[in-house]
Amino acid sequence: MKTLDQYRIPFTGLKPGKHEFEFEINKLFFEEFEYSLVKNGDLKASVTLDKQETMMVADIHITGMIELTCDVCLNQFWSKSDILQRLIIKFDGSDDVADSTDEILILKKNEFELDLTNILYEYINLSLPYYSRCEEQGENVSCDQSMIDKLKSLSNQESTSTNEDPRWEILKKIKNNN
Ligand SMILES: [Zn+2]
């Protein structure tokens, strides 16, 4: 888990006010998440952390490229990513504290660092298109027509074999045994 240590901001020593941080997000980052939909990326997260008396505000800007899999031709292609999110960090025990959400993170009073690993991962995942297509999210990429043809003929084969009456298979077997 060493890769992920770098996405932490130790904030207790910070003076009140704004502080800038930068993080690189790449293949190694996504590899730490076994079920990640994104397997590869080349992104930069710029974080402006505003430390205030009772809470902190993090403005997170993630830019770069992520690799998507096309839902039409199964091709892998690179897609531009530009994510802007604001995260409010509050501390357990403040009067108006509820549960953590995508916008609000509640930390225990004795915590001394802000771990952005899951937050960055979540923001990237939330930004993913519901349906990926070379022509839509890619730049100068088009679907692999030969692959589409291949997939089509495969699904045709499958449908003919499943449409076949299963009794024929049984009859064939009986016949072969004799
Ligand atoms: Zn495609």
Image (cartoon, rainbow, N blue to C red):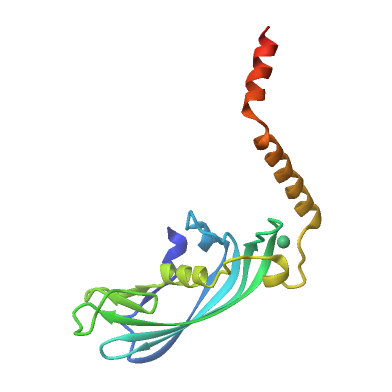
Compare residues 171 and 124 and report the one nearer the observer: 171
Compare residues 71 and 178 and report the one nearer the observer: 178
Residue 105 in the image: above or below residue 18: above
- Left/right placement of residue 162 relative to residue 24 reads right
- Residue at position x 18%, y 79% in the image: 93
- Residue at position x 28%, y 81% in the image: 90
Compare residues 11 and 126 and report the one nearer the observer: 126
Can residue 12 be seen at all in this image of the molecule?
A: no
Residue 45 in the image: above or below residue 31: below
Residue 106 in the image: above or below residue 48: above
Q: At which x and y percent is residue 61?
A: 51, 82
Q: Which quarter of the picture shows residue 43?
A: bottom right
- Residue at position x 38%, y 89% in the image: 50
- Left/right placement of residue 76 relative to residue 9 reads right
Can residue 72 be seen at all in this image of the molecule?
A: yes
* Image quarter where ligand 1 lies: bottom right
Q: At which x and y percent is residue 19?
A: 42, 87
Q: At which x and y percent is residue 65?
A: 63, 71
- Left/right placement of residue 79 relative to residue 147 reads left
Q: Which quarter of the picture shows residue 118?
A: bottom left
Q: At which x and y percent is residue 146?
A: 81, 53
Q: If the image is split into quadrants, where does the N terminus sit?
A: bottom left
